[in-house]
Image: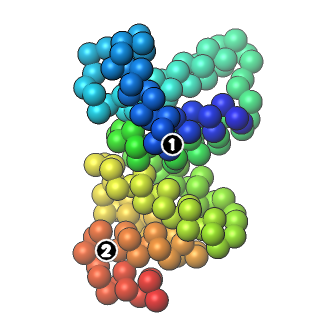
Amino acid sequence: LGFFNTLSALFTSPSASRAMQDQAAAGKISWWKDTQQGSLLKALFELIQSSLEAAKTQSAEEGNPLPAHAEKEFLWFVAKSLPRARAQLPIQKVMQVVDHVLCSQGSQGRQRKVEQLLIGVLSNQESFDDEHSAAVINKAMNGFWGLASWLHERSGEYGKALDCSL
């Protein structure tokens, strides 16, 4: 539980991100070679993602599955870190993140945070098309009006965006 929260801090905290950039520039991060300066967070995100997939495969082969909450925590990690990492995900994974985050229950303040997380996730995804946008809008119409409005505006449907905002 705490592992992915700690990793998320590397992406969401400006000082942690700067410290990582400084370490990379000084050559102290050995796995970060031959990548451009601005892609450290992307490289780290992809390393974490591939490591989790390898861990899932290994644990399945050994008959010792990962804890049940590991995937859910990873989806939160993706939602928090993907906007800064600027990595591309398969559309199935994007929709899995959307579904997971939208299913979280909380107060009005929590809803705004969820909307901002998802706008950050969706804004950088090249594979996010009108069909998937419509599916997310349908899910967002259950109280996530800011997200629905943003998606309508992104699609050029300004009247529907205004309706959601009101």
Residue of label 2:
153
Q: Looking at the picture, which amino acid does disc 1 mark?
A: Ser
Residue 55 position, x and y percent, is: 60, 19
Tell me the element at label 2.
helix
- Would you say the residues marked 1 and 2 are in contact, meaning their CB atoms lie under 8 Å apart? no
Residue 135 position, x and y percent, is: 44, 64
Residue 163 position, x and y percent, is: 41, 88
| Chosen colour scheme | rainbow
Residue of label 1:
13
Looking at the image, residue 91 lies above or below residue 102 = above
Residue 160 position, x and y percent, is: 36, 84
**Residue 133 occupies quadrant:** bottom left
Evaluate whether residue 81 shows in this view: no
Looking at the image, residue 166 lies above or below residue 1 = below
Which residue appears at 34% of the width and 62% of the height?
Answer: 131
Q: Looking at the picture, which amino acid does disc 2 mark?
A: Glu
Q: Of callouts 1 and 2, which one flags the residue occurring earlier in the amino acid sequence?
A: 1
Q: Along the horizontal axis of the image, is 106 left or right of 50?
A: right
Evaluate whether residue 54 shows in this view: yes
Which residue appears at 66% of the width and 31% of the height?
Answer: 3
